[in-house]
């Protein structure tokens, strides 16, 4: 599958359109739950919207495996937000925020428990999100 | 999906007036993420996200510290339902809202609606962009740490 969004006929769902791309990585999060980042999600969504993440691909995995903070998404009941602090060579402190969706359909689709939805850079942890961990 | 806007006129919203400049801009919608992004320079550039409320994040150029756009998360599933002032922007982009609370990652493909892009709708869409912070509920206390905004009416 592939192509642009508009290529699919009316009624096609994104689930049907599918993401059969190979994983960028599969890993276990801080609680041992399996998480995948697909190539399609990385290329078509994360890099397209957040080109600054090109140099941080490895950090996305580290963010999920050993986060500094994990919060609950404010709107999505099955999504968790993983934060990893990072100090740039210029001594600027940033946080990498990676959102993982643990919806059941994701688990069925990818044979894992979580799917990396997006990842981007912020200056600090979102204080309005409820902390799940530590 | 993109549109080109020429933003003109002034607004009382100081924050957005600072972040939106006159000239070509681009807005694009990502259906998987359900996120609408607006880029005042007409292209996606590396940035930091600075959330200001439940939906809207300012996009900051890390090098210059300048605001280069904004992103509205949960745009069709929540934002346009809770803040109808955003609806003209969705209509201008030929989007129709998802069912409220539809948080599926791979939700149904967005059904486009035929719509004449008359001047009035274009004006309303521009107004929604110019007033994006206001339209999404303003700046929540403690959300914005940047000193540049400390003296604004919204902080």
Image (tube, helix red, strand yellow):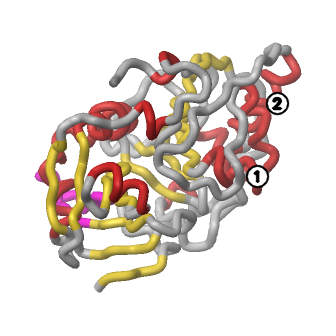
Residue at 17% from the left image edge and 60% from the top image edge: A87
Instruction: Please tell me which residue is depicted at 60% across the width and 62% down the height of the picture.
Output: B54
Residue B29 horizontal side relative to residue B89, left or right: left
Give the residue pinned by disc 2. B124
The chain containing the residue under callout 2 comes to B
Q: Name the residue under label 1.
A: B81
Tell whether position B101 is magenta: no
Using the rendered view, name the quadrant where residue B117 is placed.
Answer: top right
Of residues B100 and A48, which is closer to you in this image?
A: B100
Q: In this view, does B44 lie above or below B19?
A: above
Indicate which disc residue A92 carries.
Answer: none
Residue B9 in view of the camera: yes
Farthest residue in the right direction? B120
Question: Which residue lies most toward the bottom here?
Answer: A134
Check disc 2 and report its element: helix, strand or loop: helix
Whole-percent x, y for residue A98 in the image: 32, 58
Q: In which quarter of the image is the N terminus of chain A?
A: top left
Classify A49 as above or below B79: above
Q: In which quarter of the image is residue B44?
A: top left
Q: Where is residue A119 in the image (x, y as percent from the top left)?
A: 32, 51
């Amino acid at each position: 599958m592939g192509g642009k969004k508009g290529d699919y006929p009316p009624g096609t769902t994104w689930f049907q359109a599918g993401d059969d791309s190979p994983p960028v990585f599969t890993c276990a999060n801080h609680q041992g739950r399996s998480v995948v980042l697909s190539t399609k999600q990385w290329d078509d969504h994360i890099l397209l919207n957040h080109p600054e993440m090109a140099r941080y691909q490895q950090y996305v995995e580290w963010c999920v495996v050993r986060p500094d903070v994990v919060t609950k998404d404010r709107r999505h009941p099955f999504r968790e937000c993983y934060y990893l602090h990072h100090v740039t060579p210029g001594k600027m402190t940033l946080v990498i925020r990676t959102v993982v969706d643990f919806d059941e359909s994701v688990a069925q689709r990818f044979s894992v428990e979580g799917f990396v939805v997006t990842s981007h850079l912020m200056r600090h942890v979102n204080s309005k999100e409820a902390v799940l961990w530590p | 999906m993109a549109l080109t806007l020429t933003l003109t006129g002034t607004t009382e919203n100081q924050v957005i007036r600072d972040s939106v400049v006159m000239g070509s801009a681009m807005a694009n919608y990502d259906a998987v993420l359900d996120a609408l992004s607006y880029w005042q320079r007409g292209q996606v550039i590396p940035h930091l996200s600075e959330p200001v409320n439940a939906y809207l994040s300012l996009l900051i150029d890390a090098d210059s510290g300048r605001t280069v756009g904004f992103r509205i998360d949960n745009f069709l599933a929540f934002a346009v339902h809770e803040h109808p002032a955003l609806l003209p922007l969705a209509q201008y982009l030929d989007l129709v809202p998802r069912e409220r609370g539809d948080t599926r990652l791979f939700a149904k493909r967005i059904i486009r609606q035929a719509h004449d892009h008359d001047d009035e709708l274009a004006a309303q869409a521009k107004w929604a962009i110019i007033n994006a912070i206001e339209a999404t509920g303003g700046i929540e206390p403690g959300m914005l740490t940047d000193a540049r905004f400390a003296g604004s009416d919204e902080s």
